[in-house]
Image (cartoon, rainbow, N blue to C red):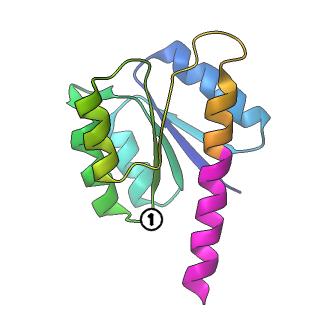
Amino acid sequence: MPGLLIADEDVLSRKKMADLFIDAGYQVTVTNSVAGVLYGTLKNTAQVVLLSPKFDELLATDLIPLLKQCNRNLTIILVASELPLALIRKARSEGIFYHALKPTRPGDEDELREAVKCAFEKVTQDSADEEL
């Protein structure tokens, strides 16, 4: 079962995303702490992480390299409405898979849904490549 970790301090946003992906058949874990993100990463319960731009007073761009050290195959999708271009560039250089806009209205979830689908396809392909 594909593991998706939703890491967001905003309770409402976390719940909306969790409901969306549970309905889509993913095994979803949610957290509002850096400790929860690290635990899910180290235990390999999540192959894909939806990460908000700021977390426990820590910017995602500071957390991403740490997560990649814990699991270099982790696929990270940064979910944010408004970020300075410099932060997006830094996040990309640190190895995020995608930067998705945070859904704000009904119907806005399509981009995020497609990004998660593509991320899991990448995880599946990477796993198949490692077995060869």
* In this rendering, position of residue 109 left or right of residue 69: right
Q: Judge whether 102 appears above or below 122 on screen.
A: above
Prevailing SS of the magenta stretch:
helix
Q: Does dot 1 land on a helix, a strand or a loop?
A: loop
Position in image of residue 85 (x %, y %): 29, 28
Nearest the viewer among 55 and 62 is: 62
- The residue located at (54%, 56%) in the rendering is 47
Task: Name the outermost residue toward the bottom.
Answer: 132
Q: Quadrant of the N terminus?
A: bottom right
Q: Residues within 10 Å of mark 1 (few under 14, many from 20)?
A: some
Position in image of residue 128 (x %, y %): 64, 78
The magenta region covers 117-132
Q: Image quarter for residue 22?
A: top right
Nearest the viewer among 25 and 92 is: 92
Q: Image quarter for residue 32?
A: top left
* In this rendering, position of residue 40 left or right of residue 61: right
Does 51 appear in magenta? no
Nearest the viewer among 102 and 30 is: 102
State the residue position of label 1: 73
* Residue type, mark 1 in image: Asn
